[in-house]
Image: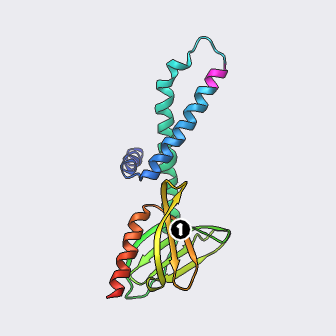
Amino acid sequence: MRLCNNFSKTLFSMKSLSRNEWFLVLLFALVLSAAQILFQFFQNDPSVSVIFQIPFIVPFSVLCGLLMVITMRNSRNRVLGSITVKVDENEIVLKTSGANYLGSGQRVGGKLVLTDRRLILISKTYSVQNLTFETSIDEIRGVDQLKFWKVFDTGLLLDLKKGGRHKFVVDNPGEWILEIRAQQRTKAY
């Protein structure tokens, strides 16, 4: 029974994969398929043709990619659940996600929280570099999307009024940008 519950949770997780996660699944499947095909090709076994094995290799590689991404997501969710971010009594949490802070030679993973007043990042407790980043919504001059290879939307680029630019890698950066800009408009009134 427990195995059936875990399997149904895994299938549910597959439906909610982001575009970047599907890209990772397909990239992993491509690399694994190529490695398996090359291995079979260089084995020089004349009784088995590589062409006849491709219909078995590709679905197996995609399944392995899906399992890898779902395992990574579940692990990330467990870690994020262990990080607590303290907010004021009247402060409203609007959005929460895992994030990586990229700045001045630092790469720190943690939990990013947007409230109606602040943007806060708390690093993982077992991280080598502990980091707490916090800025008020009023201090953000601009927010744009951070792109990987100028193609993939991978994060946020914050420009602060006091100077300084901060980069965060997050899932669904477009949603974060819309939410931050909405809070800035609310504060302007």
> Could you tell me which residue is drawn at 46 percent across and 76 percent down?
142
- Tell me the quarter of the image containing the N terminus: top left
- Tell me the quarter of the image containing the C terminus: bottom left
> Could you tell me which residue is drawn at 49 percent across and 31 percent down?
58
How many labels, in total? 1
Q: Which residues are magenta?
A: 39-43
> Could you tell me which residue is drawn at 42 percent across and 61 percent down?
172
- Tell me residue 50's x, y (percent): 56, 19
Q: Which residue is mark 1?
A: 168
Does residue 139 lie above or below 15 as drawn?
Answer: below
Dot 1 alpha-carbon crowd within 10 angstroms: few under 14, some 14 to 19, many 20 or more: many
**SS at circle 1:** strand
For the rendered model, the colour scheme is rainbow
Instruction: Pick whichever, 85 or 188, lies toward us.
Output: 188
- Tell me residue 159's x, y (percent): 52, 76
Can you name the residue that lies furthest to the front here?
150
- Tell me residue 96's x, y (percent): 43, 70
Does residue 151 lie above or below 92 as drawn?
Answer: above
Instruction: Pick whichever, 151 or 40, lies toward us.
Output: 151
Can you name the residue that lies furthest to the top here?
47
Instruction: Pick whichever, 78 or 34, lies toward us.
Output: 34
87 sits left or right of 46 in the view: left
> Could you tell me which residue is drawn at 62 percent across and 21 percent down?
41
117 sits left or right of 30 in the view: left
What amino acid is found at the position of numbered circle 1 in the picture?
A: Phe
| 50 falls in the magenta region | no
